[in-house]
Image: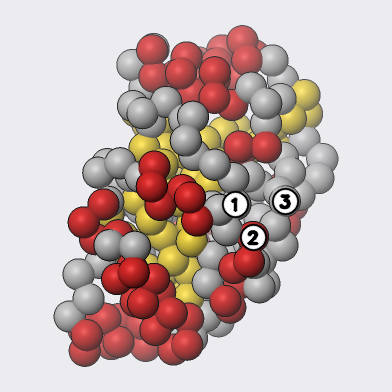
Amino acid sequence: MKVCEIFTSIQGESSYVGRLCTFVRFTGCNLRCTYCDTEYAYTGGVELSEAGIMNEVSLIGVNLITVTGGEPLLQPGVMHLTEKFLNDGHRVLIETNGSMSIRDIDPRAIVVLDVKTPGSGMWEEMDLSNMEFLKPQDEVKFVVTGRGDYQWAKDFIKEYRLLQRSSVLISPAFGVLEPSALAGWMLEDRLDARFNLQAHKYIFGPDKKGV
């Protein structure tokens, strides 16, 4: 598998924000979102075996693991790697861009599925069948670039009954939409979703890697 980086930091997103977490970031992504903040993971990286990845994570010694990218589901060995992490007693989050099926992911893992809004430029690449495979412990994330994206996300949440299926996160696109604007819309609408900031960018700065 081609790995971009393995590092430990504070989880900056999801309902696990603030938790110490080891990130396994894989190289390669099949999408090109307008607000992408990990373009460095499109290419490069090093080939590592499953055993090599597991050994490095084991030496770090942190229970919470985030499998991310790029798009981790592009890696042919990621399903088995996830299973091995879970068997070793780790709690595993899998961050995926929503364009690939989550059906065969180990049900013990927590899927953080990014539903691409129109403002991302990648909405048409979504695999909408994934909505059927969501579990109560999974999390669905929307990154919104403006009021139009926000309204679109609200409609999508209602259409697919996402609040009854799993946790729902809504994030302002960093540097594009002011967090206060999004928070205001959610307050006005009494939207029962989690306001989601990328806390690591506020802690370490927006351009620092490995955090």
Q: Is residue 188 left or right of residue 105?
A: left
Task: Name the residue carrying label 1.
Answer: 99
**Callout 3 environment at 10 Å: few (<14), some (14 to 19), or many (20+)?**
few
Residue found 48% across the figure and 50% down from its top: 129
Residue found 47% across the figure and 76% down from its top: 144
Q: Which tag, 3 or 2, sits closer to the chain's start? A: 3
Task: Name the residue carrying label 2.
Answer: 125
Give the amino acid type for the residue marked by disc 2 in the picture. Glu
The mark closer to the camera, 3 or 2, is: 2
The quarter in which the N terminus is drawn is top right
Q: Are marks 3 and 1 in contact (CB under 8 Å)?
A: yes
Residue found 34% across the figure and 69% down from its top: 159
Task: For residue 60, say whether it is visible.
Answer: no
Disc 3 to disc 1, C-alpha distance: 8 Å
Q: Classify mark 3: helix, strand or loop.
A: loop
Give the amino acid type for the residue marked by disc 3 in the picture. Asn
Disc 3 to disc 2, C-alpha distance: 9 Å
**Relative height, residue 199 to residue 133 (above, below):** below
Q: Are marks 2 and 1 in contact (CB under 8 Å)?
A: yes
